[in-house]
Image (spheres, rainbow, N blue to C red):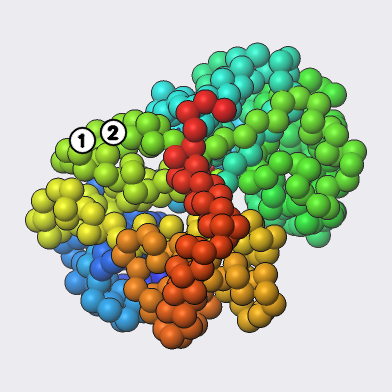
Amino acid sequence: MESAREIWERALGELQLQVSRANYTTWLKNSYGVTSQENIFVVGVPNTFVAEWLTKRLRSLVRRTLTQIIGKETEVQFIVYNKEQIQGGSLAYANQTDGGTSTKVKIDRFNPKYTFDNFIVGDCNRLAYAATIEAVENPGHTYNPLFIYSSTGQGKTHLLHAIGHRAVNNGLRVAYTSAEQFTNEFVIAIKQRQIEDFRNKFKSAHIFIFDDMQFISDKKQTLQCFFQTFNELYHNNCQIVITADCHPKDMALLSDKLKSHLEWGLIVSIQPPGFETRLSILRAKAKEMMMLASDEVLQLVAKRIWENIRQLEGTLIYLSAKAKLTGMELTSQTVNKLLTSTTNKQDSRLIMQTVANYFNLSTEELSGGKRDKRTALARQIAIYLIREEDNYSFTEIGKVLGNRNHATIIHGYKKITTETSINPKLHRQILEIQEKINSHKAPMKKR
Ligand code: ADP
Ligand code: MG
């Protein structure tokens, strides 16, 4: 399945042929595919004016185009949405030569919604939050470098932009780059033989922010350039803040030297949010979106969507679009129904991952063709656990597990059901796996 972004890029390709060039440039060019769920496709545009114009003038054309690409009847909703919110990163070099006076241009480079004030703090992210504030209020002194890691959608980029805003306010020079942008610029610099110039760009920064370091974790040359930049900045007493999707020790190609340098300061993780934090986030976002949703509905969403915060946000946008377009009232019942396919995907992914980990397999092996005893047992347990969640038909489970047929799935399910009652070891294994799954959905309040 293509992502909303990919689908929208294809749609833009087609729309470009169907509207005048001026219209395309003015109204469509700066739009993004935000999310596609059920039969609603949400397109992000830079401001309300554009959203209104597109809704009035191009909605049916866009709807037809999307329907064709997706292959089923699709509604479209235009909302005001910032590019960085989707792409999770932007490049912003503070002007290196202006002596640090903050200008409006610089402030605009950071997503205005990603501030410390808008960041909901819970047990999952308290330490990361406190450490980023310390880093910007006391740069280069307490935690240097500061390394933050988490799975996707848990607020790393948000915190980095918050540092950016605060740093500019405090009159500091800040260099912000995603690892991807760093790589692109590095490649160009090599071609143009301007490596020195490239590295010098960061030299006078008080704070150097580097987002999504995993992107360069397998790129030797870029890593080397990063390492040199890092050392130079560090010795200039520049505060360095880095994020990644894993701990440095899990980036296989990093030299031991770089790993140890990253450990000089503080390494902190952000965990998936627990129920209470999810609920606080939903309350805050619903208010911000002026969305009409009862607390009961928000609690339901918090209960069922647990993977990450981006998903929580995406779900609210989807529900609000659905309500607006169809006039549907958001009640526990309607919302429950609307969320089924999202939560199914999320739950089956978690079950497969947990079972695979438990048996030391990869999820590909679990859904692949291996037939040895361990893999076969793991697969049957996965079938059993997915089936135990509500909402799953045997056919759907077959699809999730590498397109296996209905009969194989029923066989696996029956086998585990019968055997758990007579095989205490199997029973215990299943309980252990279930416990791991549940602890992931609702991380413990204190760890
Ligand atoms: P990451 O960089 O870890 O992938 P992002 O920073 O892009 O995640 O966050 C994804 C979305 O969730 C963003 O829109 C962000 O504003 C929001 N978000 C994440 N954490 C929080 C939080 N603690 N409070 C409010 N919004 C949050
Ligand atoms: Mg990010």
Please give left or right for residue 193 compared with residue 412 in the image: right
Q: Secondary structure at mark 2?
A: helix
Earlier sequence position, callout 2 versus callout 1: 2
Crowd class of label 1 (few under 14; some 14 to 19; many from 20; radius 10 Å):
some
Q: Is residue 42 visible?
A: yes
**Location of residue 92 with respect to 407 vertically, above or below:** above
Residue annotated with mark 1: 295
User: What's the residue type where badge 1 is placed?
Assistant: Asp
Name the quadrant containing residue 58: bottom left
User: What's the residue type where badge 2 is placed?
Assistant: Arg
Q: For this rendering, which residue is in front, 71 or 406?
A: 406
| Ligand 2 position by quadrant | top right
Task: Find residue 383 and report its horizontal and vertical position in percent.
Answer: 48, 69
Task: Find residue 367 and report its horizontal and vertical position in percent.
Answer: 57, 74
Residue drawn where x is 12% and y is 60% of the image: 326
Q: For this rendering, which residue is in front, 413 or 89?
A: 413
Crowd class of label 2 (few under 14; some 14 to 19; many from 20; radius 10 Å):
some
Residue drawn where x is 64% and y is 24% of the image: 173
**Location of residue 254 with respect to 135 vertically, above or below:** below
Please give left or right for residue 316 compared with residue 220 in the image: left
Q: Is residue 80 visible?
A: no
Residue annotated with mark 2: 283
**Location of residue 434 with respect to 57 vertically, above or below:** above
Task: Find residue 393 and report its horizontal and vertical position in percent.
Answer: 34, 73
Q: Nearer the viewer's eye, disc 2 or disc 1?
A: 1
Q: For this rendering, which residue is in front, 173 or 366?
A: 366
Residue drawn where x is 71% and y is 41% of the image: 247
Task: State the mark number for residue 393.
Answer: none
Task: Find residue 13 and report its horizontal and vertical position in percent.
Answer: 42, 75
